[in-house]
Image (cartoon, rainbow, N blue to C red):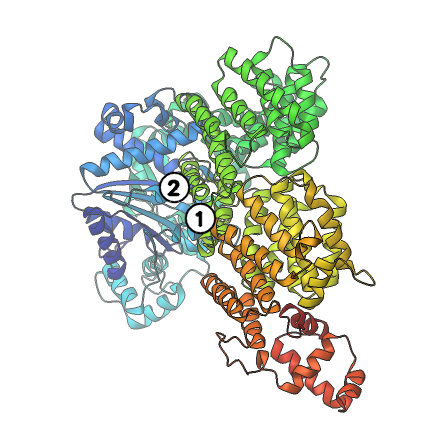
Amino acid sequence: MTIHAVSPLFVGRSRELAVLGDALDRARAGASSTVLVGGEAGVGKTRLIKEFTGRAGDALVLVGGCLELGTEGLPFAPFTAVLRGLVRELGHDGVAALVPGGDARALGRLLPEFGEPGRDGADARARLFEQVLGLLERLADKRPVVLVVEDAHWADRSTRDLLSFLVRYQPTAARLLVVVTYRTDELHRSHPLRPLIAELSRVEWVSRLALPRLTREEADALAAGILRHEPATADMDLIYTRSEGNPLFVEALVNEADGAEALPESLRDLLLASVERLPGETQELLRVASAGGQRIEHALLSAVAGLDESALAHALRPAVAGNVLVVDGEGYSFRHALIREALHDDLLPGEHTRLHTRYAQALERDLSILPAPRGAIELAHHWHSAHDSTWALVSAWRAAAVARKSTAYDEQLRMLSRVLELWDRVPDAAERIGAGRIDVLRQTAKVSHLAGEYERSVALAGAALDEIDAGTDPVRAAQVLRLRGLARYDLGRPGFLDDLREAAALVPADQPRLRGQVLESLSRMLHRPEDLPEKIATARLAMEIAHEVGDANVEAHALINMACSGSRYADMEELRAYAAARRIAAPVEAYGVLMRCAISESDALEGAGRHERAAQVAREGVEEATRYGLARTSGTFLAINLAEPLVSLGRWDEALRAIEQAISLAPPAPYRASLQGFAFDIALARGQYDRAEQLLASSRSVLSRGTHRDQAVLPHLCRSVRLLKARGRSAEALEAAGRILDEHDVTANSRYGWPVLVTCAELIWDARPYAQALEVVLGGREEPPSAAASLLRRARALAPKMDVDGDLQRAHRLSFTALAGPDSPQEAAAEPAAWQVKAWDLAAGTWAALRQPYAEAQCQVGAAQAALAAGDRQETAARVARARELAGELGVAPLLERLDVFARRARIGGSDEPADGQPLGLTARELEVLREVAAGRSNREIAGRLFISAKTVSVHVSNILAKLGVATRGEAAATAHRLRLFDA
């Protein structure tokens, strides 16, 4: 009986084809999009894409697949394949003419035919990413373009970065459709593609398409196409049960079900059955091909197999006819990766080593068999798989250089790490690669930093320094010290200034360029007020040296350092310096400087209270960072600077989206901690205390390691205090606030110091009824002095020492004054409550002018309480209404609850319940019991005061806890104090 190995009919998938067809129709109409096609191995992703592209009509179809090399993918493999196909179709000059600006040198990182790409580094990767996107845009101007990236589960990090860039920044008005396929069964929890798929799925123009298994009817149709007749029902019952509707397994089982032979017991046997029917020499050739990967060039297979063209063709023909191999350009691909994996896994250990050795030897003889840069990387893979330490080391060193040229930093890091791993096994390693172990350590540390692996960079730099004699080799010692200092700084580890100062002292006079670099780095890291003179002098010297030697990058960085040194939020003179630095950096494409300008400018604008402009600059910076290939480092840092003004402006949901997106990129730990800090602020304000607790714990785990600047530490400590206060743990909150003042000089940085003083002053009002708190604040007496009163005195003593720089700090100062009282008690002596109304109104107006709704709402609550104490019910109602309006827009449930309770108690109306209703649904008797609980009395004491039994009190207490949603009497008392249920 004659049967087809693969059904000639395309079965089912009408819905999936329709989805892809609709996306292409939209692209034709000028609305670009991306479709992520996921499905398990063997479910038919490749067949679906083949059918779809075959029906693409006038569209230009560009297909590239990710290639697996061992456990890693080949850097940029799908894009190199796409580019090579374009060169074949349009020619080198035709492709170059489509690149924006006509300068296609950056594409030389993918195909050497485009020439030397220029200098390396993060800037180079940015240029490459931009040119690939620009090329696709120009192609789409001429006709619709379908870019297909297959097997993304094998994509290395460089490929994932470029794919993410293209999807995120594909022009929405272009005639471009991007289709990405991946195995869903490969995406285990730690798989690196998993967060990328989740991240891209949130992009507006991205959709996901899940490819299910076949239904029974579809499986029957598939079998009929293979057999050329309807299959027997009994056979199909068994086949469908065994295959569970997976098309690959259905095909394999149908092909094996000819006659009465038993079906294979294991998946491996099933996959290899189609191979075992082939002639012996074909099976041997397939085993050889399996060691070459999923796709193998004809010339390489010929060289490794050792067959002449006639013998090779004779052995290959049955494999192609039997649909085990398919012709793929100038080479061959296994019809399915699972078949190759089964063949390769079936090799004996000796066969495995011999075959990979033969591949390596063939590539050593003629590396041009494979297109660059693939040849060097595959050579390293084969020597490593052959367990030849010497040549594995040498080839890894060469492959690292190729990866560097391609800006594939993760691949470069992997290759350099392999060199270090094999170093001790190769006695003459230094002679073979022309570099000593110290140089390899230094280079690996540098690449680790570029890849965002800061911990690893510090460790490698330390290992290099252990082997360097600074007395005889000061240049290398200075280079490595600078590198470790920068990595330590990025991690918040102590010792970074010591490293940089030592490096500056070591640089010889005949190395001015290195000296300028070290001095600029040192000036950038000097942040303490006492270091300001050194910072300015060092930055100026670095700028002069850099200008003399023509190092525009260092010159611009040093200019930014000087701008940050003496800047004042009140005048913002440094904005002109940032513009000048951009002018210096732009001509030399110093993207690191441009990123830093965005970071520093957005931070300065936020510090000045210019939130809208700060958010705009930060958002533009995030977009630039992604275009430059710096999304995980500079981009996520800028996301911090975006989240902060969005939180200030009350655009909290927008801030959370920016935070979530940045965290999905797996940023360095200190960046993640800062992002989580702003997510904490929102969660706490909205009453999501468990969520806030989790975020704070995650941040604490990072900030507890090493030394961090005030801008990270002080907000974190304030958050700890505010959460304790919200949880009703007032004593712990007071203790934590006292520790901040004990352990930190909050006056050294007024931007972050004022919020600390405000947090301390708030605790006096949380600890007692309004009238008592007002007496303590304005009268300054309390017998015996409480912890809250002592903390307030300390905060008031620090306030005059604190600078007030700009409108934002002035707003904090006014809030502090309203909470802590005037500098002179006589100012409020006559009418204390009326004075406080004016103080709160002034603070609220300042926050309103800054467009910070939450801060304004909090001030309005304070003003309402003061107005009620002053006897002005009309003004009280007006302030409650304004506070409720702001809190409602923000979704601040705890503040709304507090306002409702206050309004009912004050009988001013406007709450959700009648003014004569009881707070929180408590009965009159329960309210009496809660008053006694808040006073700290036991059940027996309460029973005596209210003339009821202790058992009845216990029942009331249980009801109170349930209605308040708290677990303990202490939490119930804290809630009563927080909501001021019993203020006099």
Q: Which mark is residue 450?
A: none
Image quarter hosting the N terminus: bottom left
The residue at 31%/44% (across/down) is: 148
Residue that mark 1 sits on: 196
Provide residue 390's location: percent of width, then percent of height.
Answer: 58, 25
Q: Relative to residue 961, is residue 121 depicted above or below?
A: above
Q: Secondary structure at mark 1?
A: helix
Provide residue 686's location: percent of width, then percent of height.
Answer: 54, 63
Quarter of image, res 160: top left
Relative placement, left or right, of 739 versus 692 is right
The residue at 25%/29% (across/down) is: 98
Number of marks present in the image shown: 2
- Pointer 2: residues within 10 angstroms few (<14), some, or many (20+)? many
Which is more N-terminal, label 1 or label 2?
2
Residue 2 visible in the displayed image: no
Residue 906 visible in the displayed image: yes
Residue that mark 2 sits on: 163
Q: Which residue is more in the foreground, 492 or 757? A: 757
Q: Relative to residue 980, is residue 485 depicted above or below?
A: above
Asked whether the residues under the numbered discs 2 and 1 touch, taking CB atoms below 8 Å apart as contact, a structural biologist would say: yes
